[in-house]
Amino acid sequence: DTGVSQDPRHKITKRGQNVTFRCDPISEHNRLYWYRQTLGQGPEFLTYFQNEAQLEKSRLLSDRFSAERPKGSFSTLEIQRTEQGDSAMYLCATRPLNTEAFFGQGTRLTVV
Amino acid sequence: EDQVTQSPEALRLQEGESSSLNCSYTVSGLRGLFWYRQDPGKGPEFLFTLYSAGEEKEKERLKATLTKKESFLHITAPKPEDSATYLCAVQATGFQKLVFGTGTRLLVSP
């Protein structure tokens, strides 16, 4: 257990619906990341927060995706108007200053 | 663009049969190279960080090494519980994101 909690662990949704995932990081870790991983691939970077500021965003993060980290604590990732191509594992990771990243167990999204 | 290539894609070993996994990378400036282990349906678990060519790190049956173009993860006398996907990632200087390879799926048979 890395101490990074993600909720829910699994989500099945119909195409076109909105979904929101939550990540609760280790309390003293001010850096938080979201990654997406599809079957047989490595994780792909989506976005990075330092405290409450979103400092890096991938081109993969289309207009349908939005992430927030209010008050530099937990973070949410919302996908609007889901598509079948959004089906993947969504991973949250946190790290203190200049050390390795600790990943949560992920949220498995299936869009039907 | 930063890139990580891992080989082989899959590796099957007998228990006790040592081998190495390869991670080749191109990066504008290396801040760090990371090795993670991932079990099915779970998030990646941190193994090692390497920062400069010539650096080596060990943990139980695993040893990671780094050159200017690639990293190796050596597995000595593996056991069935070492079966997992091993992921390599690089962080470029000035950036926070990790760029991952597609991983090597390792299966160790008793």
Image (spheres, rainbow, N blue to C red):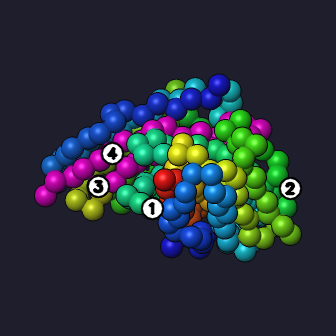
Along the polypeptide, which appears first: circle 3 or circle 4?
A: 3
Front position among marks 3 and 1: 1
Which residue corresponds to mark 2? A53
Along the polypeptide, which appears first: circle 1 or circle 4?
A: 1
Q: Position of residue A67 (x, y in %)?
A: 75, 56
Query: For the residue marked with disc 4, what is the amino acid?
Result: Arg
Q: Name the residue: 53% across, 64% down.
A: A11
Q: Name the residue: 59% across, 39% down.
A: B99
Residue B104, above or below A21: above
| 3D distance between C-alphas at marks 1 and 4 | 14 Å
Residue B74, above or below B71: below
| 3D distance between C-alphas at marks 3 and 4 | 8 Å
Labelled disc at residue A62? none
- Looking at the rendered structure, the number of numbered marks drawn on it comes to 4
The residue closer to the viewer here, B57 or A78, is: A78
Q: Residues within 10 Å of mark 2 (few under 14, many from 20)?
A: some
Would you say B17 lies left or right of A79 here?
left
Which residue corresponds to mark 3? B83
Q: Which residues are magenta?
A: B83-110
Labelled disc at residue B105? 4
The residue closer to the viewer here, A79 or B26, is: A79
Which residue corresponds to mark 1? B42
